[in-house]
Image: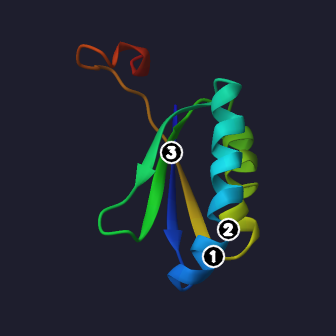
Amino acid sequence: MFILSLTYVAPMEEVDALLEDHIAWIKANHATGRFLAWGRKVPRTGGMIFAEAENRKEAEAVALADPFVVGGVATVEVTEFVATYADEGLEALAQ
């Protein structure tokens, strides 16, 4: 599993201008089974996505295709994460 950590680097008006495209990108990746969970950071400085990918190269390619990143309003950090335990209801996250 990979965690895609987005950090906004532009004013919120510029982020919001790309929000519809970003949400469409998230939904398309969710439909393929690639994205498992996502949401905003609090305070709203970016977001996080839990993603499945074959390898780091694929995860990074997906992350770099985010309209927020392509549009220059966010940067993304990709972290590989191996859950050795997941509480009830989250078992799909453990490997």
Q: Count neighbours of disc 1 (C-alpha within 10 A) and say few if under 14, some if 14 to 19, many if 20 or more.
A: many
Q: Is residue 60 above or below residue 14?
A: above
Relative depth, front residue between 17 and 80: 17
Kindly report the distance in space between the C-alpha atoms of the residues bearing marks 3 and 2.
17 Å
Looking at the rendered structure, the secondary structure element under dot 3 is strand
Image coords of residue 64 (percent x, y)? 72, 57
Amino acid at circle 2: Leu
Q: Looking at the picture, how far across and down is residue 6, in whole percent?
A: 52, 61
Q: Position of residue 89 (x, y in %)?
A: 30, 15
Q: Residue at x 59, y 29 (%)?
A: 52
Where, by quadrant of the figure, is residue 92 drawn? Answer: top left
Disc number lying in front (3 or 2): 2
Q: Is residue 38 left or right of residue 57?
A: left
Label 3 or label 2, whichever comes before in sequence order? 2
Say if mark 2 contacts mark 1, CB within 8 Å: yes
| Whole-number angstrom distance, CA of label 2 to CA of label 1 | 9 Å
Q: What residue type is labelled 1?
A: Val
Instruction: Tell me the number on the disc at residue 24.
Output: none
Q: Mark 3 points at which residue?
A: 49
Looking at the image, residue 80 sits to the left or right of residue 18; the answer is left
**Residue at point 28%, 19% (across, down):** 85
Residue 73 marker? 1
Mark 2, Cα crowd under 10 Å, few <14 / some 14-19 / many 20+, is some
Label located before the other in sequence (3 or 1): 3
Residue labelled with disc 2: 18
Position of 2 with respect to 21 (left or right) is: left
Between 82 and 88, the one nearer to me in the picture: 88
Quadrant for residue 20, please give it: bottom right
